[in-house]
Image (spheres, coloured by chain):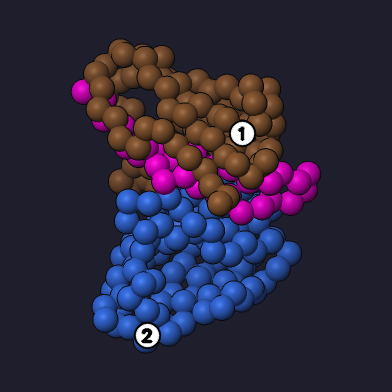
Chain colours: A brown, B blue
């Protein structure tokens, strides 16, 4: 089954304790992206990746890191989490063609609470 | 700043009625996509309309795009209780960066 898998689904942690949210897709998609969803603000893009070893900042990259060492994985790293990073996070992937966008496939989300 | 904004923020209708949601955006786009999000789940892609298209249909969904007004609408005909969800429009400027609105929450009463 084609899917985007995020782990963990829920996490409560404390300020300053490094954490990683994993994202994996089994569709051989080139493009992957991370979003955070906050009430009243919709989804905001954190980072995206056009292919292996090619990442770039979205609208709200501060406080986050990503890496793309393999095509299927795109982990989101919070080196020193703070309470304002409490949010619902989504990973998404899509086929990437040069001049055309394709629908993004989303994971089921990771709810992070930073105390 | 947000690129897409949906209107209304919330909509409540009876089963069988049509639901119309609007999306406005600020700058030129390559395409516009509509997504649905059921409570507690990820977003599901509904329909994509390119900047050179004016109307697109998919089943009970009809999307229009007016680039001169920088707006789009999503019409769901003959709505069902299962259509209850939040609906988002998403735009992009350079095929890589996407901007989502804050969504329209649709409630379809049986």
Residue at image location 53% in from the left, 75% down from the top: B61
Q: Chain of mark 1?
A: A
Q: CA distance from mark 2 to mark 1?
A: 42 Å
Q: Chain of mark 2?
A: B
Report if residue B4 lies within the magenta region: no
Which region shows up in magenta? A87-115
Q: Where B23 falls versus A71 (above or below)?
A: below
Residue at image location 37% in from the left, 85% down from the top: B17
Residue at image location 37% in from the left, 59% down from the top: B38
Left or right of B12 in this view: B6? right
Q: Where A50 falls versus A62 (above or below)?
A: below
Q: Nearer the viewer, residue A92 or B55?
A: A92
Decide if residue B90 is in sight here. yes
Decide if residue B24 is in sight here. no
The quadrant of the picture occupied by the C terminus of chain B is: bottom left
- In the picture of the structure, the residue carrying the numbered disc 1 is A72
């Amino acid at each position: 089954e084609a899917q985007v898998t995020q782990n963990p689904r829920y996490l409560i942690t404390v300020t300053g304790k490094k954490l990683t949210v994993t994202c994996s897709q089994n569709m051989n998609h080139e493009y992957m992206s991370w979003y955070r969803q906050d009430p009243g603000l919709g989804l905001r893009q954190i980072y995206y990746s056009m292919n292996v070893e090619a990442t770039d900042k979205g609208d709200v990259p501060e406080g986050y890191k990503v890496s793309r060492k393999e095509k299927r994985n795109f982990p989101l790293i919070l080196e020193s989490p703070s309470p304002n990073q409490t949010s619902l996070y989504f990973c998404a992937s899509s086929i990437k063609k040069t001049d055309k966008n394709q629908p993004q496939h989303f994971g089921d989300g990771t709810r992070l609470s930073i105390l | 700043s947000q690129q897409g904004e949906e209107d209304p923020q919330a909509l409540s209708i009876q089963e069988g009625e049509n639901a119309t949601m609007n999306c406005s955006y600020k700058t030129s786009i390559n395409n516009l996509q509509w997504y649905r999000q059921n409570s507690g789940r990820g977003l599901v892609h509904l329909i994509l309309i390119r900047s050179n298209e004016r109307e697109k249909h998919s089943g009970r969904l009809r999307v229009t795009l007016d680039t001169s007004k920088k707006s789009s609408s999503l019409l769901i005909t003959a709505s069902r209780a299962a259509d209850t969800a939040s609906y988002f429009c998403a735009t992009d400027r350079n095929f890589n960066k996407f901007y989502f609105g804050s969504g329209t929450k649709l409630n379809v009463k049986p």
